[in-house]
Image: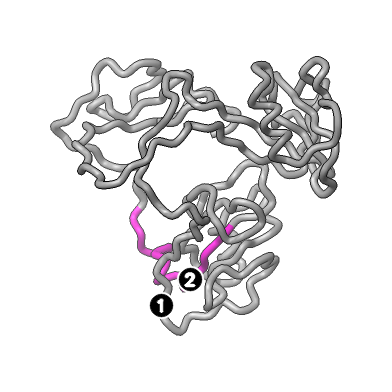
Amino acid sequence: WPGTSDLICECERAMAAAPSEATVAVPLSSAWVHYEGYNCFGGHGAIGVPNKNPIPGDHFLPTCKEACEAEPECEGIVMVRETQPYKCWLVKDLNPMACLKNTDYDLWQVVPASPSEDHVEVPAVDASPTPAPSATNPEGVSCAGLPSVKATCSDNGCKVLAGGMTGRTCSEYCAQSGFGCAGAWEEVANDCNIKATLTCDEVWPGTSDLVCECASAAASGSEDAPSTSGPTNSESTTCTGLSGVKATCSDNGCKVLAGGMTGRTC
């Protein structure tokens, strides 16, 4: 989660994975978090990397990212959103929440790969973009008239790329048209391809659009679904000796508030 140093993680005993017939080793590359409209510079959420703010010449986004990945001090890049090739600013000491917002610039924050691994094993799959998965929507349901639709992602018009989503959830978006929420995602680049799966009540920091799937309230389960505080771990499992624990959130010690999580996952 961008800008945090701790996460609540729940652990469970790992099961032996079924062997895969076809795997391929791929480099563990950096991940990037996109903050649309954020401009970060001295006194406003970042410091420029010396002699590389901007780097010489005009660049497209991929070469700007490569320059940051090659610079040990670089934590992100700033570029003008709709003019490329153009200047590429490398920045460090990032605090996105202190940057200027709603500008013509975009911030891309790099999340480095783990230094302890040089590759991961993944199944050999088709590398084409993966469309957002469709939640079950009853046949005959149509969602014509949803507001602020930037792209339609399903035949019945219930799954859309919705604009004006800064600080809003897909539950709120669907509810304004009398629907429940059946799914929510952060898209890759103003399209229907997914970057991250969200809950219907989750906000994605720094974005102005989300892929939302709306459905009737009964189909989405928004009226009758019980409230839960998270997945339940086996009663026989205990988790002693977890590192970086700031608070214990379950009786068996498997759900904890873990510190030192900047750039890491549970």
Q: Residue at x 62, y 30 (%)?
A: 110
Task: Name which quarter of the figure residue 31 lies in.
Answer: top right
- Does residue 253 lie above or below 50 as drawn? below
Q: Which numbered disc covers residue 226? A: none
241 or 130, nearer to the observer: 130
- Which secondary structure, mark 1? loop
Q: Residue at x 51, y 27 (%)?
A: 113
- Is residue 257 within the magenta segment? no
Q: What's the CA distance linking mark 1 and mark 2?
A: 8 Å
What type is the residue that disc 1 sits on?
Answer: Pro
51 or 257, nearer to the observer: 51
User: Quadrant location of the C terminus?
Assistant: top left
Task: Name which quarter of the figure residue 78 lies in.
Answer: top right
185 displayed left or right of 191: left
Near mark 1 (Cα within 10 A), the count class, few <14, some 14-19 or many ≥20, is few
- Which secondary structure, mark 2? strand
Q: Which residue is mark 2?
A: 215
Q: Which residue is mark 1?
A: 138
251 or 108, nearer to the observer: 108
The extreme left residue here reads 236
**CB under 8 Å between callouts 1 and 2?**
yes
Task: Name which quarter of the figure residue 118 lies in.
Answer: top left
From which residue to which does the magenta span run?
Answer: 211-226
